[in-house]
Image (cartoon, rainbow, N blue to C red):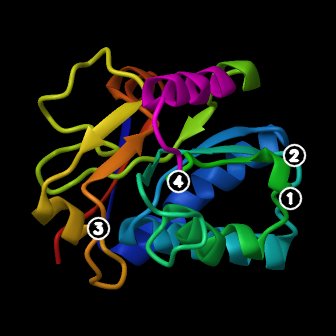
Amino acid sequence: MLLVLKPNSEELGREAARVVANAVRRNSALRLGLATGNTMLAMYQELVHLHRRESLDFSKVVTFNLDEYLGLSSNHPQSFHHYMQQSFFAHVNVDADNIHIPDGAIKGNYQQYCASYEEAIRNAGGIDLQILGIGRNGHIGFNEPTSSLGSRTRLRHRNHPRIQANSFTGQRLPQSRCDRQGHRRAAHRLRYGLRAAAS
Protein backbone atom coordinates (compact mmCIF):
# COMPACT_ATOMS: atom_id res chain seq x y z
CA MET A 1 0.00 0.00 0.00
CA LEU A 2 1.23 3.49 -0.86
CA LEU A 3 0.82 5.97 2.01
CA VAL A 4 0.49 9.64 1.01
CA LEU A 5 0.63 12.34 3.69
CA LYS A 6 -0.77 15.81 3.03
CA PRO A 7 -0.62 18.85 5.35
CA ASN A 8 -4.36 19.63 5.34
CA SER A 9 -7.76 18.34 4.26
CA GLU A 10 -7.89 20.52 1.13
CA GLU A 11 -4.67 19.07 -0.28
CA LEU A 12 -5.77 15.60 0.81
CA GLY A 13 -9.03 16.09 -1.08
CA ARG A 14 -7.18 17.19 -4.22
CA GLU A 15 -4.88 14.17 -4.05
CA ALA A 16 -7.78 11.76 -3.50
CA ALA A 17 -9.64 13.36 -6.42
CA ARG A 18 -6.52 12.96 -8.58
CA VAL A 19 -6.43 9.23 -7.77
CA VAL A 20 -10.14 8.84 -8.59
CA ALA A 21 -9.89 10.95 -11.76
CA ASN A 22 -6.93 8.95 -13.06
CA ALA A 23 -8.82 5.71 -12.39
CA VAL A 24 -11.89 7.01 -14.26
CA ARG A 25 -9.74 8.10 -17.20
CA ARG A 26 -8.15 4.63 -17.38
CA ASN A 27 -11.51 2.84 -17.05
CA SER A 28 -14.61 4.82 -18.04
CA ALA A 29 -16.83 2.08 -16.52
CA LEU A 30 -15.00 2.17 -13.17
CA ARG A 31 -16.83 0.54 -10.26
CA LEU A 32 -16.28 3.08 -7.51
CA GLY A 33 -16.95 2.61 -3.80
CA LEU A 34 -17.85 5.89 -2.12
CA ALA A 35 -17.97 7.18 1.45
CA THR A 36 -19.49 10.19 3.18
CA GLY A 37 -18.42 12.61 5.87
CA ASN A 38 -16.52 15.85 6.24
CA THR A 39 -13.25 14.23 5.17
CA MET A 40 -14.71 13.44 1.74
CA LEU A 41 -16.07 16.92 0.96
CA ALA A 42 -12.83 18.34 -0.48
CA MET A 43 -12.45 15.30 -2.73
CA TYR A 44 -16.00 15.60 -4.05
CA GLN A 45 -15.56 19.35 -4.61
CA GLU A 46 -12.40 18.74 -6.63
CA LEU A 47 -14.05 15.97 -8.67
CA VAL A 48 -16.90 18.35 -9.51
CA HIS A 49 -14.33 20.96 -10.61
CA LEU A 50 -12.54 18.37 -12.78
CA HIS A 51 -15.87 17.40 -14.34
CA ARG A 52 -16.66 21.03 -15.14
CA ARG A 53 -13.17 22.24 -16.12
CA GLU A 54 -11.73 19.16 -17.79
CA SER A 55 -14.89 17.28 -18.78
CA LEU A 56 -14.08 14.35 -16.51
CA ASP A 57 -16.77 11.89 -17.61
CA PHE A 58 -18.67 9.88 -14.99
CA SER A 59 -21.45 8.72 -17.35
CA LYS A 60 -20.40 5.04 -17.27
CA VAL A 61 -19.07 4.94 -13.70
CA VAL A 62 -20.96 2.64 -11.32
CA THR A 63 -20.99 3.66 -7.66
CA PHE A 64 -21.68 1.79 -4.42
CA ASN A 65 -21.89 3.73 -1.17
CA LEU A 66 -20.74 2.24 2.11
CA ASP A 67 -23.77 2.76 4.29
CA GLU A 68 -26.95 4.55 5.28
CA TYR A 69 -28.75 5.26 8.53
CA LEU A 70 -31.60 2.82 9.06
CA GLY A 71 -34.83 4.76 9.55
CA LEU A 72 -33.95 7.70 7.27
CA SER A 73 -35.61 8.16 3.91
CA SER A 74 -33.45 9.11 0.95
CA ASN A 75 -34.72 12.72 1.04
CA HIS A 76 -34.01 13.23 4.75
CA PRO A 77 -31.39 16.00 5.14
CA GLN A 78 -29.27 13.76 7.40
CA SER A 79 -29.31 10.77 5.05
CA PHE A 80 -26.27 9.76 3.08
CA HIS A 81 -28.47 9.79 -0.05
CA HIS A 82 -29.01 13.50 0.53
CA TYR A 83 -25.34 14.09 1.32
CA MET A 84 -24.23 12.36 -1.90
CA GLN A 85 -26.73 14.25 -4.05
CA GLN A 86 -25.76 17.61 -2.57
CA SER A 87 -22.01 16.97 -2.53
CA PHE A 88 -21.46 15.06 -5.74
CA PHE A 89 -24.14 13.37 -7.84
CA ALA A 90 -26.18 16.50 -8.63
CA HIS A 91 -23.05 18.16 -10.05
CA VAL A 92 -21.61 15.44 -12.29
CA ASN A 93 -22.98 13.13 -14.98
CA VAL A 94 -23.23 9.81 -13.12
CA ASP A 95 -26.19 7.88 -14.56
CA ALA A 96 -28.87 7.56 -11.85
CA ASP A 97 -29.19 3.84 -12.69
CA ASN A 98 -25.52 3.38 -11.77
CA ILE A 99 -25.84 4.88 -8.27
CA HIS A 100 -26.22 2.38 -5.42
CA ILE A 101 -26.77 3.53 -1.83
CA PRO A 102 -28.27 1.28 0.86
CA ASP A 103 -31.94 1.97 1.52
CA GLY A 104 -32.43 3.39 5.01
CA ALA A 105 -36.20 3.04 4.76
CA ILE A 106 -36.30 -0.77 4.60
CA LYS A 107 -38.35 -2.51 7.27
CA GLY A 108 -37.42 -6.04 8.27
CA ASN A 109 -35.55 -8.72 6.32
CA TYR A 110 -32.31 -6.86 7.03
CA GLN A 111 -30.04 -9.84 6.43
CA GLN A 112 -31.72 -10.52 3.10
CA TYR A 113 -31.39 -6.87 2.11
CA CYS A 114 -27.69 -6.74 3.04
CA ALA A 115 -27.10 -9.98 1.11
CA SER A 116 -28.83 -8.49 -1.93
CA TYR A 117 -26.58 -5.40 -1.73
CA GLU A 118 -23.53 -7.68 -1.69
CA GLU A 119 -24.97 -9.55 -4.68
CA ALA A 120 -25.42 -6.27 -6.58
CA ILE A 121 -21.73 -5.54 -6.03
CA ARG A 122 -20.77 -9.01 -7.24
CA ASN A 123 -23.06 -8.72 -10.27
CA ALA A 124 -21.41 -5.42 -11.18
CA GLY A 125 -18.03 -7.17 -11.13
CA GLY A 126 -16.85 -6.01 -7.72
CA ILE A 127 -15.33 -2.66 -6.82
CA ASP A 128 -12.27 -1.32 -8.62
CA LEU A 129 -11.49 1.57 -6.27
CA GLN A 130 -12.88 2.09 -2.75
CA ILE A 131 -12.82 5.44 -0.95
CA LEU A 132 -12.75 5.00 2.85
CA GLY A 133 -12.53 7.18 5.91
CA ILE A 134 -10.45 6.33 8.94
CA GLY A 135 -12.09 7.37 12.20
CA ARG A 136 -10.51 8.78 15.34
CA ASN A 137 -10.59 5.37 17.02
CA GLY A 138 -9.13 3.63 13.97
CA HIS A 139 -12.38 2.42 12.45
CA ILE A 140 -12.20 1.97 8.68
CA GLY A 141 -15.38 2.65 6.75
CA PHE A 142 -17.33 2.35 10.04
CA ASN A 143 -15.93 -1.09 10.75
CA GLU A 144 -14.81 -0.75 14.35
CA PRO A 145 -11.33 -2.02 15.31
CA THR A 146 -12.95 -5.09 16.93
CA SER A 147 -14.97 -6.02 13.80
CA SER A 148 -14.22 -9.36 12.20
CA LEU A 149 -11.78 -9.19 9.29
CA GLY A 150 -14.17 -11.46 7.39
CA SER A 151 -17.23 -9.23 7.88
CA ARG A 152 -19.49 -8.26 4.98
CA THR A 153 -22.56 -6.06 4.59
CA ARG A 154 -24.58 -6.08 7.79
CA LEU A 155 -26.75 -4.09 10.16
CA ARG A 156 -24.70 -2.36 12.87
CA HIS A 157 -25.69 -0.38 15.94
CA ARG A 158 -23.89 2.85 16.73
CA ASN A 159 -23.41 4.47 20.10
CA HIS A 160 -24.55 8.03 20.73
CA PRO A 161 -21.11 9.75 20.54
CA ARG A 162 -20.34 8.10 17.17
CA ILE A 163 -23.76 9.02 15.81
CA GLN A 164 -23.45 12.63 16.89
CA ALA A 165 -19.93 12.83 15.43
CA ASN A 166 -21.48 11.96 12.06
CA SER A 167 -24.44 14.32 12.25
CA PHE A 168 -24.35 16.91 9.47
CA THR A 169 -26.70 19.35 11.22
CA GLY A 170 -26.42 18.39 14.87
CA GLN A 171 -29.82 16.66 14.83
CA ARG A 172 -30.26 13.37 16.66
CA LEU A 173 -29.92 10.40 14.31
CA PRO A 174 -31.18 6.81 14.45
CA GLN A 175 -29.03 4.35 16.39
CA SER A 176 -28.74 1.75 13.61
CA ARG A 177 -27.21 1.86 10.19
CA CYS A 178 -26.89 -0.65 7.40
CA ASP A 179 -23.18 -0.95 6.75
CA ARG A 180 -22.47 -1.90 3.18
CA GLN A 181 -18.92 -3.07 3.54
CA GLY A 182 -17.25 -5.16 6.14
CA HIS A 183 -13.50 -5.38 6.66
CA ARG A 184 -13.14 -8.25 4.20
CA ARG A 185 -14.40 -6.27 1.21
CA ALA A 186 -12.83 -2.97 2.28
CA ALA A 187 -9.38 -4.42 2.91
CA HIS A 188 -9.43 -6.18 -0.45
CA ARG A 189 -9.45 -2.83 -2.27
CA LEU A 190 -6.91 -0.79 -0.29
CA ARG A 191 -4.27 0.52 -2.65
CA TYR A 192 -3.57 4.02 -1.36
CA GLY A 193 -3.52 5.44 2.13
CA LEU A 194 -4.24 9.17 2.16
CA ARG A 195 -3.99 11.09 5.37
CA ALA A 196 -3.96 14.76 6.28
CA ALA A 197 -1.47 15.70 8.96
CA ALA A 198 -2.96 17.07 12.16
CA SER A 199 -2.96 20.84 12.18
**Which residue in the protein does label 3 denote?**
166
**Which residue in the protein does label 2 denote?**
60
Crowd class of label 4 (few under 14; some 14 to 19; many from 20; radius 10 Å): few
Report the Cα–Cα distance between label 4 and label 2.
Answer: 27 Å
Horizontal side of residue 69 vs 139, given as left or right:
right
Residue in the picture at 79% in, 40% down? 26
Query: Which one is in front in this view, the residue at disc 4 or the one at disc 3?
Result: 4
**Which of the 4 image quarters holds residue 178?**
top left
**Which of the 4 image quarters holds residue 195?**
bottom left
First to last magenta residue range: 105-121
The amino acid type of the residue labelled 3 equals Asn
**Which residue in the protein does label 1 denote?**
57
**Which residue in the protein does label 4 denote?**
105
Report the Cα–Cα distance between label 2 and label 3.
Answer: 30 Å
Quarter of the image with the C terminus is: bottom left
Residue in the picture at 41% in, 52% down? 70
The amino acid type of the residue labelled 2 equals Lys
Earlier along the polypeptide chain: callout 4 or callout 2? 2
Q: Secondary structure at mark 1?
A: loop
